[in-house]
Image (tube, rainbow, N blue to C red):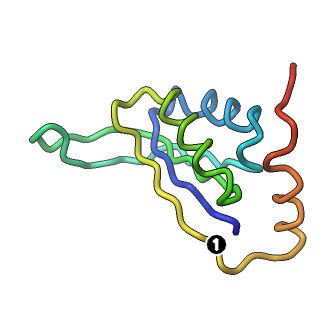
Amino acid sequence: MVIAVLVTIPEKDAESLAKMLLGERVCACINIVNGVKSLFWWKGKLDEASESLLIIKTKETLLAKLKMLIKNNHPYEVPEIISFKIDNINQEYLDWLNKEANALPFSS
């Protein structure tokens, strides 16, 4: 099953987290959407942040490892990690995603 995972992160940290996750091969593609304004409750107070939104495409079987890597490398005490199943996808993209996610980790 293919899933999309949404993660908000400070803009300055978005690209480095995305590259690390791709390097670990726990996903095939990450879109970085800059300029997200988030409003939320934090420790009893209304807060806001300027963030980036990562849209991560991967396989459901890789979600546990992906979540662990995000939690261990994210600057927030409680990172947002929301996943949902993709029930309609073109076959060529699905084939590509299945090939690229969970291949051998990138070595530089």
The residue nearer to you, when weighing 63 against 79, is 63
* In the image, farthest residue toward the top: 108
Residue occupying image coordinates x 80% and y 46%: 102
Q: Position of residue 29 (x, y in %)?
A: 74, 50
Residue occupying image coordinates x 47% and y 56%: 82
Q: Image quadrant of residue 65?
A: top right
Q: Quadrant of the N terminus?
A: bottom right
Residue occupying image coordinates x 58% and y 47%: 64
- To which residue does mark 1 refer? 86
Whether residue 88 sits left or right of residue 67 in the image: it is: right
Whether residue 46 sits left or right of residue 50 in the image: it is: left
Residue occupying image coordinates x 58% and y 34%: 69
Secondary structure of the residue carrying tag 1 is loop
Q: How many marks?
A: 1
Whether residue 78 sits left or right of residue 72 in the image: it is: left
Amino acid type at image mark 1? Ile
10 lies above or below 36: above
33 lies above or below 87: above
Whether residue 73 sits left or right of residue 76 in the image: it is: right
Q: Position of residue 107 (x, y in %)?
A: 86, 23
Q: Badge 1: how crowded within 10 Å, few (<14), some, or many (20+)?
A: few
